[in-house]
Image: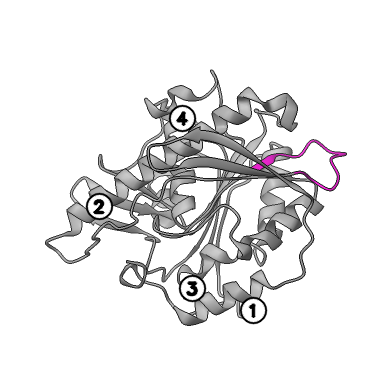
Amino acid sequence: MRKYLTALLVLALLPLSLNAQQTYLVAHRDTCDLYMDVYQPVTDTVARPTILYVFGGGFVTGRRDDPYVLPWFKLLNENGYRVVSVDYRLGLKGVPMKFDLFHLIQSAKYTKKAVDMGVEDVFASVRYLADNAEELGVDMDNIVIAGSSAGAMISLSCELEACNRTERAGVLPEGFHFAGVISFAGAIMSDTGKPSYRRTPCPQLLIHGTKDGAVAYGKMGFARWGMFGSSFLVDKVLKPAGFEYQIYRYVGHSHDMAANMMANWPEEKRFLEISVMGRQRLVIDSTLEDPVMPSWESVTLNDIY
């Protein structure tokens, strides 16, 4: 865990000069106010997607302007992408999480509630963008949602709920759909078994370590309760249905892939330019043993909670 935090600190100290950010109040909640930060691109000569970013932190910590992710925002801005980084309520803060056999279902319920709260809050941000799209320069048909760890879980669930038009998705504009999803070590938390989509989901880019001890790479759960990770989603949901996806399976890596946005930029760039902007169907299933990919000490659920 110490090595992981040290690596994030190093990233945070990289030279950084972002375009002026603008902060907007999105919504009032009973425990806090929700804000978003908007970072405009350096150049917008090409109509590129807006990246809606959802931070990670195990639903107990993290913030929309975490220093370690700012170099990635700068990279996106320099490549012509607007970044919108959003708040959500930390649904597991102060919650007694335990992962032994006797508490597994209860902890799953707590986690599902935290994800649901996050989805509700992110949908409020999408609604705000829709209501202020002209002022902010946002094309509502061209939004890619991206998240890290807990934020990736929320992002994947946002797309699932948008496709299934759940009650929470009722605040979204009529006919709204995400243009893409980028998940850094994410999963879908379900209380109804294997996730399923009522309409074709948008292209998804899934980046995950095969030894992730914090967010399941495969499946972790019991009975109808489960955390369905990147490998399971591709092998059992997206691939059998013929949906579009790109997955990069980093052999031996743990939860470090949740914070390797900069190192995975070539994969992200290809996804954004070909699958999202070019609207060309591209399916990739890549298993990598990459000796130069940054790697840190494994983080487990017990480390986080």
Say whether residue 49 is magenta. Answer: yes
Q: Nearer the viewer, mark 1 or mark 2?
A: 2
Q: Between disc 4 and disc 3, whose residue precedes?
A: 4
Q: Is residue 177 visible?
A: no
Left/right of residue 109 with respect to residue 141 in the rendered view: left
Instruction: Give the distance between the C-alpha atoms of the residues marked 1 and 2, in whole angstroms.
Output: 35 Å
As drawn, 296 above or below 196: below
Which stretch did the figure color magenta? 40-51
Q: Nearer the viewer, mark 4 or mark 2?
A: 2
| Kind of residue indicated by mark 2 | Ala
As drawn, 23 above or below 2: above
Instruction: Tell me if mark 1 has few (under 14), some (14-19) or many (20+) residues whose alpha carbon lies within 10 angstroms of its own.
Output: few
Say whether residue 38 is magenta. Answer: no
Q: Which residue is mark 3?
A: 253
Q: Which residue is mark 1?
A: 292
Instruction: Tell me if mark 3 has few (under 14), some (14-19) or many (20+) residues whose alpha carbon lies within 10 angstroms of its own.
Output: many
Instruction: Give the distance between the C-alpha atoms of the residues marked 1 and 4, in whole angstroms.
Output: 37 Å
| Kind of residue indicated by mark 4 | Cys
Residue appearing at x 30%, y 44% in the figure: 113
